[in-house]
Each structure stands twice: as C-alpha cells, then as structure tokens.
Amino acid sequence: MLTRKIALISLLAALSIVGRIYMSSIPNVQPSTVIIIITGLVFGARFGLTLALLTAIGSDFMLGFGFFTVMQVIAWGVIGLLSGFLARFRTKIPMLVMACYAGGCGYLYGFVVSLNMLIGGVPSFITYWIMGLPFDTYHAIGNLAFYIILSPILIRLLEAEKKKLQI
C-alpha cells in the first residue's frame, strides 16, 4: 500500500505542478491551491501538507526559485493543514460554502507569502500586501471557479482511491 500512496501523491503533485505551469500566463490563477484543498479534505492534513511541499518545489523548478518558495511552501502547507482539519466536516458543509473557503484561501495564500516582506519592516509588508491584493483577488476568483469545476470529479475519484488504500 505504501507504493500506491506514493504513486497517488506523485500523480496529484504532477497534476498540481502542470496546472500551475500551464496557467502561469494568467497571474495567480492556477488549480494548485484547489488540488491541495481537495487532497487535504479527502486524505487529511498530512497528504495536504505533502502535496503543498511537492507543488511549490516542483513548479518552481520551471518558474524559478527564491525566498518566496519557502513562503509558498508555508502558505500552501497552512492551507493543506486547514483543509485536513476540515475533512471530518466536509460532508456537512455545502459546496458553495466550500467554494467560498477555497476563494478565501487565495487571500490567505497571498497574505502568508507577503510575510517575507517583514524583513523590511511592517510598513514594507503592509505596502507589499496591499499592492498584491488585486492578484490575491485573481487567485480567490480562480480558486472559487476551480473548486466548483474540479471538486465534484476529483473528490469522487479520490474517495474511491481512499477506499482502495483503506486509509
């Protein structure tokens, strides 16, 4: 079963990385955050956190590395963990509320990634974060749309795989 889990996380990471690279021409609009959310919802926080790490590092091989890569790992990691904690309530939460949660994760991601500017002081961080709000809005709208499109299919597929893995 360990091999099957590794193959599954690798497949999800590849899907997330390719989606991020493919959509890179549209600023901050990519399916990676939603794939991390759905993975966390179905398999729990550990899977979500692992996928966050693999997505950030894997996609930055193509898009470029920097200190922001660490912040991306932290931001997506927080989202993966939060989604993992929501896993036990997922069936009780309406899809539209979950889509709004995915949208809110776009703003959370932008906020956490902006924290690297605290090195320059609080005014530097606030300026950087406010300047990035339009891009965070693109991310939020993209997440909302991707969640509505991907969640019915991806959750069903991952739930079937979860039964096979007996997790």
Image (cartoon, rainbow, N blue to C red):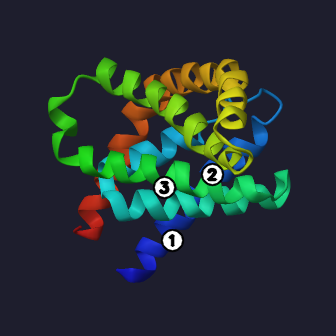
Q: Residue at x 61, y 49 (%)?
A: 16
The crowding category of the residue bearing disc 1, from other C-alpha atoms within 10 Å (few below 14, some 14 to 19, many at least 20), is few
| Amino acid type, residue under disc 3 in the picture | Gly
**In screen coordinates, is 140 left or right of 147?**
right
Is residue 76 placed above or below 89 in the rendered structure? below
Marks 3 and 2, the one that precedes in the sequence: 2
Mark 1–mark 3 Cα distance, whole angstroms, equals 20 Å
Residue position marked by numbered label 2 in the rendering = 72
Q: Are marks 1 and 3 in contact (CB under 8 Å)?
A: no
Q: Secondary structure at mark 1?
A: helix
Single out the mark in the foreground, 1 or 3. Answer: 3
Q: Quadrant of residue 69?
A: bottom right
Q: Is residue 29 visible?
A: yes
**In screen coordinates, is 12 left or right of 29?**
left
| Amino acid type, residue under disc 1 in the picture | Ala
Residue position marked by numbered label 1 in the rendering = 7
Residue position marked by numbered label 3 in the rendering = 77
Q: Quadrant of the C terminus?
A: bottom left
Image coordinates of residue 123 in percent, x first then y, are: 68, 32
Q: Is residue 14 visible?
A: no
Q: Secondary structure at mark 3?
A: helix
